[in-house]
Amino acid sequence: MYRTSLPATPGIGFKPQHFEAILTDGHPIGFIEVHAENYMGAGGAPHAMLSALREQYALSVHGVGLSIGSAEPLDTAHLGRLKALCEHYEPHSFSEHLAWSSHGEVFLNDLLPLPYTDETLNRIVSHIDQVQDTLRREMLLENPSTYLQFAESKIPETEFLAEIARRTGCGLLLDVNNVFVQAANHGTSPDAYLAAFPLHRVREIHLGGHDAQQDETGARLLIDSHGAAVADPVWSLYESVIARTGPLPTLIEWDNDVPDWPVLAGEARAAGAILARYRTREAA
């Protein structure tokens, strides 16, 4: 089975408006990441740009449509399209979400939470086994950002992820902004969450921005919007992780209100500075 092999450098989520800038000023990054579902069509400008970038950069493919946590069987047609995409571009990493997003013929265009029970655990393990057997490559599973908790959940999320990784051999994708958002929404400690997280299974890190809103009761609610710069407390959490793990591939996610390239490149440089600091310490 092919194992994730992204470089321990900053990466960015590719947006077509940045294509020329990346080709001419891509120095801050070592890899790009794309959403799988945007490249399941045949040919055209998206594939032409991705092919050109793939010649110069490592590639991470991030899925949003497999619905790993669904109570129904995986969509084998979707999985087949994903396999064809991976065989064509040979990405250095493939990842998906600890969530569900479809029911029957309805695709809900959102990443919805799950109850952490033995039944859910068994179902997700089976689905990940199917994905990895089909793709013949390691899948990374991303921790979610959530806005509610299930009363029937019996297993802490960090233990749930650790057991999935143990039983399937999959890696984990640690989204540090998701940790911060979830802790703020549920009144828990992000540091305690990270202390319990199986960091030895992490193959990639995501950093992104969030927005603050109010729920129907007037309480503060953080939304994982991917539409702003990485917040200072998220940078601090990220550095605490890298201090424990050493340098890891780190993606800057910015999917909404996408800025001009210099702003995104600046975020990548900030991640790169932290990675370089701990790379130097490892070498000392």
Image: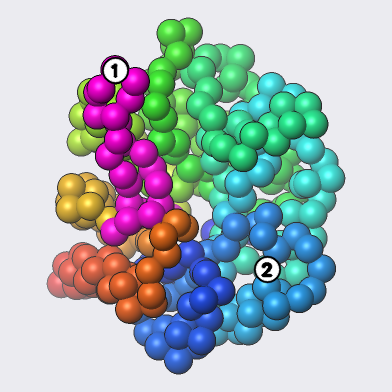
Q: Which of 103 and 62 is in front in this view?
A: 103
Q: Tell me the residue at 56%/50% (across/down).
A: 95
Q: Give the range drawn in magenta.
A: 204-229
Q: Which amino acid lies under the numbered mark 1 shown in the image of this protein?
A: Thr
Q: Tell me the residue at 45%/56% (across/down).
A: 256
Relative to residue 123, is residue 109 depicted above or below? below
Residue 83 seen from this side: no
Residue picked out by circle 1: 217
Residue 273 image position (x, y, % from top left): 22, 71
Residue 228 seen from this side: yes
Relative to residue 1, is residue 178 depicted above or below? above
Q: In which quarter of the image is the N terminus?
A: bottom right
Q: Which amino acid lies under the numbered mark 2 shown in the image of this protein?
A: Glu
Image disc number at residue 189: none
Q: Tell me the residue at 48%/64% (across/down).
A: 13
Residue picked out by circle 2: 90
- For disc 2, the neighbor class at 10 Å (few under 14, some 14 to 19, many from 20) is some
Quarter of the view holding residue 9: bottom left
Q: Distance between the residues labelled 2 and 1?
A: 48 Å
